[in-house]
Image (cartoon, rainbow, N blue to C red):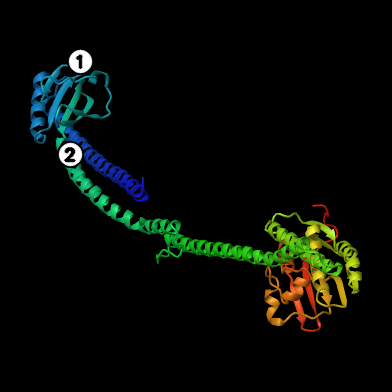
């Protein structure tokens, strides 16, 4: 069932229950009040007629006991005083009826056990008519008597039925009008939701720029605003996916281009060695070229694999001594620096940091390797505890990086000097790899460089107190 139908049905049920309850309470309350008023009037009338009856008996009889003729005479005179339609009856304590204007077949059941002076009354229904029957027992001249009054209240029932018919008519009109208004209201209320549904279908069909135009400030307006913001985020993410797909396509194209030239050369030199008799020097040169290109391809393959692996984000970081991580990297770098005749220094403050050891060491080695390829004579690796953060910097005095290229040097396959990078087996992937490792550690590479004077690359990590559990 649609929401508009649910709103319609629920509202109509509430209206029907409310109107029915209200009508019942009003009509029933009005009827009860009318009956109470009629009972009060009937009791007053009863007291008046009984007093008149007793007065006539007292004035007409001086004897200690009453006779039948006196009772009937007093009863007839009292009946003449009663309003039209009212009936009286006089019965003694033995059940003998002296006078009765009641129907001949009326049974005065249960009156013989009520010899109290209290008034008693009841409402009776004899078919289509309603009556109030009032009785009272009294002793007159040593004679126990029952005085009865039958007062017709059928007019009250007729009035009640008239009110009920009028109410039913008004009730039907009200329910019909409520159905029309509720239907229109529920349709109007759910119209924004239908707009959201239409817009969601369009978005699911690929129209990501579709938005809902709802200007209300209620919950529906808030929902529409949230939907539009969600749609904007979806559109943004879809665009990012398209961009990533394009970047991957460019990545594969660049990688294929990187492979094409060295492979062509390797195949050419290998074919030359295979098919021709070369001098020892030419053979050595060809083998050296194949070796160099093979090394470059090997480095390219390893870095390519690392970049693919770096797409993971679930690496576990562990608490470690920063100076130990830096000193381990120093021990690995010393042979390379000695072979290249580079003056290499390393200093590290103590401090606790949270890293993935293998990845972070790869970051430091790559940065140091890049520094060694920049015609540097002096390279320093330093770790400085700044209190809240720990800064690790690699500084060289090489050729530096042009300022306009600093923002692009972490892009995959980007090389400032491609000819020099290829001679050194570079593929433009080292800094891209380093940037991804830095992001895994919640930081980024910070480059400061002056052309012709050197470059400093730094990363900053959070410092943890010494009492932290180092084996989390």
Q: Nearer the viewer, residue 155 or 433?
A: 433
Secondary element at tag 2: helix
Where residue 22 appears, as percent x and y from the top left, is 29, 45
Q: Residue at x 53, y 62 (%)?
A: 238
Query: Is 273 located above or below residue 457 in the figure?
Result: above
Compared with 306, 162 (above or below) is above
Q: Is residue 363 above or below residue 87?
A: below
User: Which comes before the other along the chain, label 2 or label 1?
Assistant: 1
Residue drawn at 69 percent across, 64 percent down: 259
Instruction: State how many labels appear.
Output: 2
Q: Quadrant of residue 411?
A: bottom right
Image spot of residue 369 (x, y percent):
82, 69
Left or right for 49, reference 188 = left
In the rendered view, would you say 423 is above or below 64? below
The answer to whether residue 242 shows anywhere in this view is yes
Residue 380 x %, y %: 87, 74
Quadrant where the N terminus sits is top left
Badge 1 marks a residue whose secondary structure is loop
| Tag 1 residue | 94
Instruction: Give the left or right position of residue 207, taking residue 452 as reference.
Output: left
- Residue that mark 2 sits on: 161
Residue 116 left/right relative to 316: left
| Image location of residue 458, percent across then percent down | 78, 72
Q: Indicate which disc residue 251 carries.
A: none
The CA span between labels 2 and 1 is 41 Å
User: 172 or 399: nearer the eye?
Assistant: 399
Q: Visible in this render: residue 462?
A: no
Q: Nearer the viewer, residue 45 or 356?
A: 356
**Quarter-of-image position of residue 462:** bottom right
Query: Could you say which is closer to the camera, residue 389 or residue 292?
Result: 292
Determine crowd level at label 2: few under 14, some 14-19, many 20+ residues with C-alpha closer than 10 A.
some
Q: Which residue lies at the image location 84% right of the left edge and 80% below the top edge?
A: 397
């Amino acid at each position: 069932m649609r929401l508009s139908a649910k709103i319609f049905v629920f509202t109509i049920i509430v209206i029907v229950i409310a109107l029915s309850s209200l009508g019942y309470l009003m009509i029933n309350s009005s009827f009860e009040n009318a009956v109470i008023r009629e009972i009060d009037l009937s009791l007053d009338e009863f007291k008046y007629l009984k007093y008149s009856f007793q007065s006539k008996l007292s004035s007409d009889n001086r004897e200690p006991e009453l006779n039948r003729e006196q009772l009937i005479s007093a009863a007839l005179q009292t009946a003449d005083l009663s309003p039209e339609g009212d009936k009286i009856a006089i019965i003694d304590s033995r059940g003998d009826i002296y006078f009765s204007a009641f129907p001949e077949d009326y049974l005065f059941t249960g009156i013989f056990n009520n010899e109290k002076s209290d008034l008693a009354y009841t409402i009776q229904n004899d078919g289509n008519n309603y009556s109030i029957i009032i009785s009272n027992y009294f002793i007159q001249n040593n004679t126990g008597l029952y005085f009865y009054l039958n007062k017709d209240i059928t007019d009250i029932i007729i009035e009640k039925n008239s009110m009920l018919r009028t109410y039913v008519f008004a009730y039907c009109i009200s329910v019909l009008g409520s159905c029309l208004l509720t239907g229109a209201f529920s349709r109007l209320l759910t119209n924004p939701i239908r707009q959201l549904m239409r817009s969601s279908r369009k978005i699911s069909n690929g129209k990501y720029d579709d938005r809902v135009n709802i200007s209300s400030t209620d919950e529906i307006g808030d929902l529409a605003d949230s939907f539009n913001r969600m749609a904007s985020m979806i559109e943004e993410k879809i665009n990012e996916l398209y961009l990533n797909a394009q970047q991957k396509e460019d990545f594969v194209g660049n990688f294929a281009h990187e492979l094409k030239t060295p492979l062509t050369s390797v195949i050419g030199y290998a074919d030359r060695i295979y098919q021709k008799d070369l001098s020892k020097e030419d053979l050595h040169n060809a083998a050296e070229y194949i070796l160099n290109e093979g090394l470059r391809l090997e480095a390219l393959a390893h870095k390519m694999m690392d970049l693919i692996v770096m797409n993971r984000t679930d690496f576990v970081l562990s608490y470690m001594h920063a100076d130990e991580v830096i000193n381990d990297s120093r021990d690995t770098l010393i042979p390379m620096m000695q072979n290249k005749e580079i003056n290499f220094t390393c200093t590290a403050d103590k401090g606790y940091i949270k890293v993935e050891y293998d990845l972070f060491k790869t970051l430091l080695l790559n940065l140091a390797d890049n520094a060694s390829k920049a015609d540097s004579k002096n390279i320093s690796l330093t770790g400085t505890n700044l209190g809240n953060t720990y800064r690790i910097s690699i500084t060289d005095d090489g050729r530096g990086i042009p300022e306009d290229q600093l923002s692009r040097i972490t892009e995959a396959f980007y090389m400032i000097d491609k000819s020099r990078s290829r001679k050194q087996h570079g593929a433009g992937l080292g800094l891209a790899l380093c940037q991804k490792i830095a992001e895994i550690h919640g930081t980024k590479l910070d480059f400061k460089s002056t052309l012709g004077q050197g470059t400093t690359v730094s990363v900053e990590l959070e410092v943890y107190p010494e009492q932290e559990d180092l084996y989390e």
